[in-house]
Image: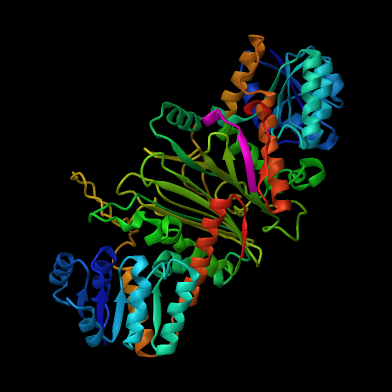
Amino acid sequence: MRVGIIGSGVMGEVHAAGWRQTEAELIGVHSANLEQARRVAEEFGIGVYDRLEALLEQADIVDVCVPTFLHKEMVLRSAAAGKHVVCEKPLALNLQDGQEMIEACQRAGVRLFVAMVVRFFPQYRLAQELVSKGQIGKLGVMRLKRVAYVPRAELSDNWYLDESRSGGMLVDLMIHDFDYARWLGGPVERIFARVNRATDGPGQYAQALLRFKEGSMALIEGGWAYPPGVFRTALDLSGTEGLIEWSSDEQAPVRSFTLSRDGSAAAVGLPTAGLATDPYALELQHAYQAIVSNEPFSVTAEDSLEALRIALAARESMLTGQPVSL
Amino acid sequence: MRIGILSFAHLHAEGYAALLKTWPSVELVGFSHEGAEEARHYAAAYGLRWFGRPQDLLTEGLDGVIVCSENARHLELVEQAAEAKVSILCEKPIEVSLEAAQRMRAACERNGVQFMTAFPMRFAPAAQSVQAAVRSGELGAIYGVNGINHSEIPKAHRAWFADKERAGGGAVMDHVVHLADLLRWYFGAEVTEVYAEVDNLFYPQEVAVDTAGLLLVALENGVQASIDCSWSRPTWYPRWGHLKMEVVGERGTVVMDAFAQHLHLYSRGAARPYSWPGFGPNPDAALLQEWLSSLREHRAPSVTWNDGYQALRVALAAYQSAQAQAPVKIPHPALG
């Protein structure tokens, strides 16, 4: 099948590299930023589509990698064109939009895959498998960490920092761990969250306390709070019969110690997976395979909507200072 | 200095005894303990004289006593020591209710004796370095703190830790006070609000106290902090547990793992086949040194009754919050 990417920013480029590791034919990219699109196209030897209509016409699968506030429009247009859709997370900025997007794809008879990439990180996946096999007994307390630095403005317009366009840190970043915690713990009963913002600038740090209907609880930590280039993630899953610990602080299979240049941090922090396992490629391989063979996705658009529901509840709790029941 | 230990119920008594025995300036006169069989064991193990009743030890002309009983017996022993005009180092949490804690203070004030709360982590160089980083301003304005005091369930060492009557609760009562105290001490600020989820998620069939607890608290200076006090480490974990804190600020983050200085030991036939024997400084030793100095210098110790009391308020607020499923405010009239 032929894949076209909409958006040429950080995620457009990451996904282009991911698609390269699938059997799909990556035909090209469309972007509002033509110069950036040309760079990406050149890097991957693909075409640039000046007009969205032209890309929609020629692709079988459209990969929506534009900023979050544009997801809805692009997903609806792709569905209307009868194309399968891969959409970056978060699916939408609010539940109603997300629901409309899911329904539009259903009506159009096209598949909608939301790229909840953390489910494809090998350590997160292995931990989930071990928990589901009962290796740590009944789940008790989950601890999840995802703290990065403030996304930097490579462009003049840093939409990540604009909550009305990105949903903000809780919706853009912490949604990964809300989704992961729900994957393991089941439906959420209630959530309480605190967010502290920088006295100056867009920095912020949040902690959320979740209680699940099946009994377990979770402490989820997220932030745009570290110095540029520092991105730490961790999981700690404890149960009645055992414990799983993992932290990105642990040693990587290869470490290098070199004289480095200043300002070498990427614009937006992405966790690294280690050697030879690109989770972005894994998620796109999975999406592609499921679309081609018409099999269910391992993570559904409804899952991504539920993760959004938790993130929005966290934001509400932060504003009201009270727990929010789901 | 003539020192006594009131009760060996708390396992820290053994560590204190071992340290005090080695210091030439200290004469460890003996200990009181209720159970005769246990007492004979400790007397033999540490070469100590056993007194069946606290009163008998308290009339030995002591400079100070360490109260290492079950939490819910602290008041009784502190009152006896105070009446005997002997200054006190008291294990944490200082009691299981605010009323009992207040009566302890009254007894000490009435009799003019000093009271120190045993918060050893203040004497850990790692925690001191975090405090210095916070106070120096190098981290900038602080967003928040992520705090962990995990352990295995302590009932294998001392059954009363998992007994509501004697301990006053489970994991929350056992661990929250350590991190609450470090937070108060790092920032010189009180905890003003507590939200908590508390439950018995790890040993529902075996004990009747909470074994899982997560707190999200606010300090008067606006800093948010989480405290994970869960007994969530398995009994086959390489060590009893750990104490970790990350302070996240606008200009920097400090990551503390207070007991990170350890070897990796793989020993066939050991109780823990893989274990983490530590080689870092022992905070209990520095805690005892400060207490002995305060006795020698007839001054108030650096960690006071109020420190123990404020930390206990946080732990009790966690139980209230979990019950109410709502945040609980901790009033501090002096803050206005």
Which colour scheme appears in the figure?
Answer: rainbow
Q: Quadrant of the C terminus of chain A?
A: bottom right
Position above or below: A61 against A252: below
Residue B4: image location, x then y, percent: 74, 21
Residue B205 falls inside the magenta stretch: no
Q: Nearer the viewer, residue B21 or B166?
A: B166
Q: Residue at x 45, y 55 (%)?
A: A234
Residue B336: image location, x then y, percent: 64, 28
| Direction from residue A144 to residue B165 in the image, left or right | right
Q: Is residue A143 visible?
A: no
Residue A95: image location, x then y, percent: 49, 70
Q: Residue at x 70, y 42 (%)?
A: B317
Q: Which of A104 and B214 is in front in this view?
A: A104
Q: Which of A22 and A73 is in front in this view?
A: A73
Q: Which of B10 and A203 is in front in this view?
A: A203
Q: Can residue B302 be seen in this view?
A: yes
Write the start and end of the magenta stretch as one range: B185-195
| Direction from residue B45 to residue B137 in the image, left or right | left
Q: Residue at x 77, y 37 (%)?
A: B96
